Image (tube, rainbow, N blue to C red):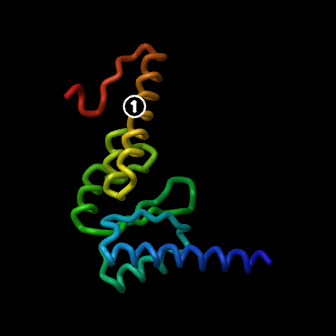
Amino acid sequence: MEEVLIRRALEADVKVFSHLIYEFEKGVRNLVLYTLSEEYLPLALNKLDHREIEYFVQPVPNKGSVNIFFGRSECLKTLRKFLKKRPLNSLSPEEDFILGALLGYDLCRQCERYCNRVERAEKTYKENNEPFVPMYGNL
């Protein structure tokens, strides 16, 4: 029974991943982020290599998973500039906003998310009696 569930989960992952490739190839998405178990990475990379789609892989700390970013070279280049090798949960509110915009997430929701993250950071700094300085200062 457990093997059947695992096989179905893998089949579902492969279908979702294949659909994201389809959307990229049709121009629906410019950049895609997909997280999957490290054991399925060779299968995913084979699909991307076969279609000559540019990508990069980032390990997810302590999870046995990886993030695969694939898409247009301009988007990947931009992402590499600020992401480097840092995990996604270490991004500043500004970097998180940029990532969401590059991934094509709803812009108004990204604005809400950004404001919430900045407000939480301001509150934390205030509670610790430290000055809060946004990533890019007061522009």
Farthest bottom residue in view: 50
Q: Is residue 35 left or right of residue 71?
A: right
- Provide residue 4's location: percent of width, then percent of height: 73, 80
Determine the residue positioned at 46% across, 22% down: 123
Viewer-proximal residue, 31 or 7? 31
Viewer-proximal residue, 19 or 50? 19
Q: Quadrant of the C terminus?
A: top left
- Provide residue 101's location: percent of width, then percent of height: 33, 52
Q: Quadrant of the N terminus?
A: bottom right
- Provide residue 117's location: percent of width, then percent of height: 43, 35
Determine the residue positioned at 33% across, 64% down: 31
Farthest top residue in view: 129
Determine the residue positioned at 44% across, 33% down: 116
Q: Classify 10 Å Cα crowding around label 1: few (below 14), some (14-19), many (20 and above).
A: some
Q: How many marks?
A: 1
* Residue behind mark 1: 118
Farthest front residue in view: 108
Determine the residue positioned at 46% across, 60% down: 59
61 up-or-down from 54: above or below: above
Query: Circle 1 — which element?
Result: helix
**Which of the 4 image quarters holds residue 24?**
bottom left
6 up-or-down from 61: above or below: below
Farthest left residue in view: 139
Q: Tell me the amino acid under the disc marked 1.
A: Val
- Provide residue 82's location: percent of width, then percent of height: 28, 49
